[in-house]
Amino acid sequence: MTDISRLHRELVARVLDSDATASRELRRAASDNAGLDEPIRTLVEKVADRSYTVTDEDVAAVRASGLSEDQIFELIVCAAVGAADRQYDSATAALVEATGGGQ
Amino acid sequence: MRLEVLDRGHGLPAKALFAVIRLMTRQPVVDAVKLAFYRKDFYGAGPLTNEAMRGPSQWSVGDRELMAAFVADANRCPFCVAAHSATSGQWYGDHAKVADTLADLDSAPIEEPLRATLRMLGKLAREHSVDAEDMRAVLETGVTPAQIEDALAVSLAFNITARLANAFDFDLASPDAMAAGAKHLLKRGYR
């Protein structure tokens, strides 16, 4: 499990803090699914909460707003990683509670 | 694929690798591979996924592939369901067991510890959270806390991957291409 924790931490650090084409501020907002303006807001919200509803039009609207394909790629990845992180945190906290705070 | 860069934006080494894959498997390169090899310095989740799916664990590889398929199903991701059903079914040598589990968890021909774990993972994927009571229900079937941690690592990897497959609109490849991919995943893992 230490390997998983390290690899998980490294993934989050890469997508949020490495040099990329979207600003760190925007990547952080996509990861948090908060503080975004349309049309990226709808796309990120769908990726986080119901990814199966994302449409070609959602992506086209973000492209038309001036973001490049690489920026869209990065923001979708941040949205997916952030949302999965919150699920993971919820589950690990529940496990700690169920096992009385430790193993 | 909704982004053209994921189809055609790879560097020369990846393009060369794709040509080899097409030649060796006589199948098109599946979209999951295109994502895995796009800007690995940025996303590059292969090592995390590989550790969750192939690292040391009391769960078998087949069990973990079934968890991946189950989490993908809860995320309504047809590509990932097909890919990991094929891989789990190949490992077990029993595709019906996988199909039955996805069709009806309660009556599926699997052990109770795995059933309870899948139930918790499904709730986590659908409702985005679980509580201590959900965990106790898993622990009561004899699953250890370490096994739950291992299952949560699988679900972390596939709650990310399924979202990306849906958002980028991965094409569902032919059954032959999926079977070739499953064979590769069992032989080489996710790195």
Image (tube, rainbow, N blue to C red):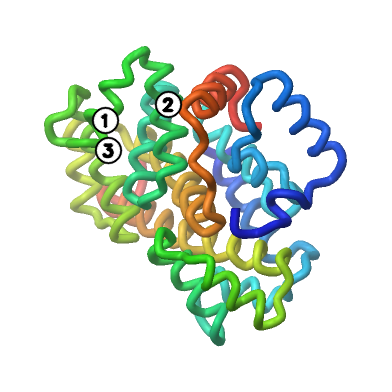
**Which one is nearer the viewer's eye here, B82 or A92?**
B82
Q: Nearer the viewer, mark 2 or mark 3?
A: 2
Report x, y in % for residue B155.
Answer: 42, 44
Q: Residue at x 62, y 45 (%)?
A: B45
- Relative placement, left or right, of B57 versus B12 is left
- Tell me where residue B150 sits by quadrant: top left
Q: Is residue A99 visible?
A: no
Q: Chain of mark 3?
A: B
Q: Nearer the viewer, mark 1 or mark 2?
A: 2
Tags 3 and 1 on a common chain? yes
The disc label shown at residue B114, or none: 1
Q: Earlier in the sequence, mark 1 or mark 2?
A: 2
- Relative placement, left or right, of B22 versus B174 is right
The residue at which mark 3 appears reads as B117
Q: Earlier in the sequence, mark 2 or mark 3?
A: 2
Q: Chain of mark 2?
A: B
**Which one is nearer the viewer's eye here, B141 or B89?**
B89
Give the farthest residue toward the right: B12
Circles 3 and 1, Cβ within 8 Å, touching? The answer is yes
Q: Residue at x 39, y 63 (%)?
A: A50
Tags 1 and 2 on a common chain? yes
- Tell me where residue A51 sits by quadrant: bottom left
Report x, y in % for residue B53.
Answer: 50, 31
